[in-house]
Amino acid sequence: MNFQANFANNLLSKLHSGISMGWWMFFDTFWALVFGFTLSGVIQAYISKDRMRKSLGDHSLKSVAKASFFGSVSSSCSYAASALSKTLFFKGADFTTSMIFAFASTNLVIELGIMIWILIGWQFAVAEFIGGTVMIILLWILLPSLMPTKLLSKLRSDSVDTGSSSMDGAEESGVAKGAKLGDAAGYTIGDFTMMRVELFVGFLVAGMATALIPVSFWQRLFFSGHGFISTIENVLIAPVIAFISFVCSVGNVPLAAALWHNGISFGGTISFIYADLIALPLVLIYRKYYGTKIAIRLTLIFWFVMSASGLVTEYLFKLFGATPRIHELKMVQSRIGLNATTILNAIALLLAAFVFYQYRKARKSNNSELSEFAKDLVCGMQVRKADAAATYSYQGETFYFCMDGCRDSFAKEPEKFQARR
């Protein structure tokens, strides 16, 4: 009985510790999330995705640079990024630049860099952008050579895009016409609504991984003390952990912090952060979008590129003596008080309230039939009607979605999702 009681008490204590650590990681990064999502919403409201598509017709250096820029100012959600890259490809964009767009959308966005800086350190934030550039260069070199051009061409020509909107008829300018604060607020609220599960799971899993899984397990999983061999093993294994963790986008940053704290190498941590685009649910989405052959080849290329970029980044930092030497889960604080984090969070709360007010005001004043924007009733994301990745007609009304998966979910239970208006 004493053993069982001690075990139960120990388990409860660890669970409490894991939840507590997840909460403080969220508290430390709350202001960064609010500022990042708000800035992203403003940019998305004023940039036309049709202009993106028309700028990505080949994989020249100029087009790759544009894909990287457009991706970096777009939403950081892995699912939305993969859906939009698919839509861009089927509407005429080059496959390589479409994939580079997706990578930039999830690895070069502002809120991701801020979160990484807060939770792990400035070296990782800088490495994220340096390694992201390396990754884009590798994709630019490898994808045109390794992806079957004939199969891709046939896939695009045979595609019957029954769920897509008239993106070809979208506005010509690169700036959305008549965009307002309410539209930007809609993107901000929509992105947060869509990513709330990933964020919650990411912080919770990171806290639990630190509290429940002994350091010895991570040390056995990730080799250390063997020089180059350890680095190679770490950068190869890290994306596999991302594959089975199901955590995507900014939600995998807290787990990356936990892995770094428990012994994974610098390059391995960077590779893990990059690997949000090969989480198992996304690989299954690739299979649905492009077919099994392309999905398998694409996933293997992504895995290699993520690992190689982590390896290159680690040795670049070693060359300049900038690699952090102490594995530390960087917690700014463990209490609320009169300090910089609390003050920033208070300002962020005021900003969030203002954004929500603008969002509600816009929803009340807009005529849903005349508005340029619509709400994806499944995930909550705001989409521009002219850019929507998928549409569905029901009872004489057209509904707009950020991806095919949301449209398919709506089609199964339309009455359920209509209640979310």
Image (cartoon, rainbow, N blue to C red):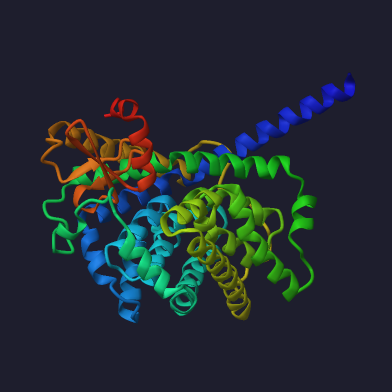
x%, y% of residue 40? 32, 53
x%, y% of residue 174? 18, 64
Which residue of the protein is positioned furthest toward the right in this rendering? 2
x%, y% of residue 259? 65, 54
> In the rendered view, would you say 19 is above or below 3?
below
The image quadrant that residue 268 belongs to is bottom right
Q: Quadrant of the N terminus?
A: top right
The answer to whether residue 79 is left or right of residue 177 is right
x%, y% of residue 159? 32, 58
The answer to whether residue 117 is left or right of residue 159 is right
Q: Quadrant of the C terminus?
A: top left
Q: Is residue 89 visible?
A: no
> In the rendered view, would you say 312 is above or below 390?
below
The answer to whether residue 363 is left or right of residue 134 is left
Residue at 59% from the left image edge and 54% from the top image edge = 242
Q: Is residue 342 visible?
A: yes
